């Protein structure tokens, strides 16, 4: 019997994408923008921010390595809020429905910079639906590291992992959650999520 639903945020409930913002910085040059995001302010660099590294430190290190890209590295920091493109409304509608049923405990585990998460907290009022939210940058652990799942089970007081569902758009994160006995749902789109939750008797 499912009692707890654990959500990821980025790519599931919130649309975050640096590409449109950086595209403007590069005067609408897609090749330069993609190269910059694949090689300079790339996934690994952003992951360090999600692990708790400060933007000031990360910006300083990257600028020292690529001084010719100083302006663009600064833009990635200064225009970060613009990278929050908005909520994924179809999924938020599902969240509203779950909350309204009042049958489940809602939690979240998100890979997110501790510095930047307050922006989302202010912007999306439905974040207050969650009884507890683990922000990776605050605890200095990121998915899919097993340590963050161990920590989550303890912090959320989930003594029986099989009573919990975890929704995430990255299959690696789902696979690790399932290794703990949590039921994983790989998010691809809201229609599929609704079908998956219906099969579990949640909506």
Image (spheres, rainbow, N blue to C red):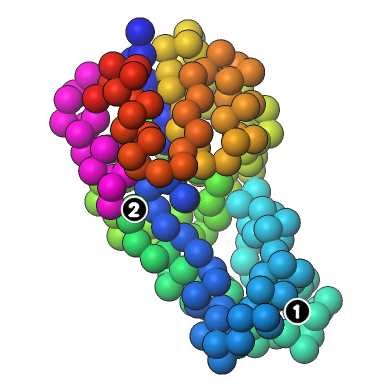
Report helix, strand or loop for mark 2. Answer: loop
Image position of 188 with respect to 37: above or below: above
Whether residue 59 is visible, yes or no, is no
Residue at image mark 1:
63
Q: Mark 1 or mark 2: name the one nearer the start of the chain.
A: 1
Please tell me whether mark 1 or mark 2 is closer to you in this view.
Answer: 2
Instruction: Give me the C-alpha separation between circle 1 and circle 2.
Output: 33 Å
Tell me where residue 6 appears, x and y as whole percent: 42, 30
Place residue 131 in its image quadrant.
top left
Which residue is found at the position 28% from the left and 16% from the top? 201
Q: Residues within 10 Å of mark 1 (few under 14, many from 20)?
A: some
Residues packed near mark 2 inside 10 Å, few (<14), some (14 to 19) or many (20 plus)? some
Q: Which disc, if any, is residue 88? A: 2
Residue span colored magenta:
89-106
Residue plotted at (65% across, 48% down)? 51
Q: Quadrant of the N terminus?
A: top left
Q: Which of the 4 image quadrants contains residue 7?
A: top left
């Amino acid at each position: 019997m499912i009692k707890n639903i654990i959500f990821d945020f980025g790519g599931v409930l919130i649309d975050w994408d640096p590409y449109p913002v950086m595209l403007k910085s590069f005067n609408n040059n897609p090749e330069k923008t993609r190269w910059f995001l694949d090689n300079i302010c790339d996934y690994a660099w952003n992951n360090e921010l999600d692990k708790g590294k400060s933007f000031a430190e990360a910006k300083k290190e990257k600028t020292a390595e690529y001084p010719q890209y100083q302006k663009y590295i600064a833009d990635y920091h200064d225009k970060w809020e613009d990278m929050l493109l908005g909520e994924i409304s179809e999924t938020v509608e599902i969240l509203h429905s779950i909350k309204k049923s009042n049958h489940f405990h809602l939690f979240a585990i998100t890979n997110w910079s501790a510095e930047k998460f307050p922006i989302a907290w202010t912007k999306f009022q439905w974040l207050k639906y969650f009884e507890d939210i683990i922000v990776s940058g605050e605890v200095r652990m990121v998915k899919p590291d097993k340590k963050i799942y161990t920590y989550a089970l303890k912090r959320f007081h989930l003594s029986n992992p099989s009573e919990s569902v975890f929704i995430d758009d990255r299959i690696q994160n789902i696979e690790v959650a399932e290794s703990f006995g949590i039921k994983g749902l790989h998010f691809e789109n809201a229609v599929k999520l609704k079908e998956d939750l219906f099969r579990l008797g949640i909506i």
